[in-house]
Image (cartoon, grey):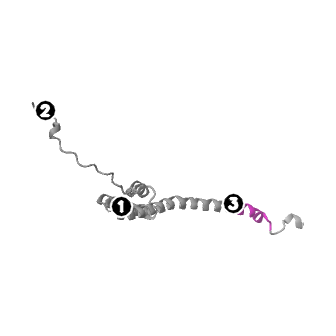
Amino acid sequence: MDTSYPREDYLPAPAHKREPSRSIPVSPPPRDHLIWSIFNTIYMNFCCLGFVALAFSVKARDRKVAGDVEAARRFSSKAKCYNALATAGSVVLPLLLAALVITGVIHLSKLAQESVGFFTYQFSPSDNEDK
């Protein structure tokens, strides 16, 4: 009589019960910010900061895969900083430039309206008043 499952008398003896081990809180792996870096490289490459951020993101991912978590954190932090600078530079500087152009146009239009009186002033009396 052959069965496909092991019989009770052939089962290995159960090992002693283990106490639940105290788990050390494991921090999550560092983020590499690769998608943000690719976006900054393709669309908003202000002063090549997006490309630098992409390089650090790839280094962070490589270090994370290799198991060097501390180096991955350093590269991830640098990638995050360069991404923030690239995004801020690509958003803030055009807005600042637009604000300067708008205020310049407003100032020039006011100046032109004030100087209309200067250009319509007659320096010499008309000939009709002398006669």
Measured from the top left, where is residue 4 in percent x and y?
A: 14, 34
Horizontally, is 22 left or right of 108 in the view? left
Mark 2 surroundings: few (<14), some (14-19) or many (≥20) residues within 10 A: few
Q: Dot 1 corresponds to which residue?
A: 60
Q: Dot 2 corresponds to which residue?
A: 3
Q: Dot 3 corresponds to which residue?
A: 109
The amino acid type, in three-letter code, at marker 3 is Ser
Task: Kindly identify the residue that appears in the image at 19 percent across and 45 percent down.
Answer: 13
Q: Nearer the viewer, residue 11 or 41?
A: 11
Question: Disc 2, disc 3: CB below 8 Å?
Answer: no
The amino acid type, in three-letter code, at marker 1 is Ala
Say which mark, if any, is on residue 17: none
Q: Is residue 74 magenta?
A: no
Q: CA distance from mark 2 to mark 3?
A: 99 Å
Question: Disc 1, disc 3: CB below 8 Å?
Answer: no
Task: Kindly identify the residue that appears in the image at 32 percent across and 61 percent down.
Answer: 63
> Total marks drawn?
3
Q: Which residues are magenta?
A: 110-122
Secondary structure, mark 2, is: loop
Secondary structure, mark 1, is: helix
Q: CA distance from mark 1 to mark 3?
A: 53 Å
Horizontally, is 39 left or right of 9 in the view? right
Residue pushed farthest right? 131
Q: Main secondary structure of the magenta part?
A: helix
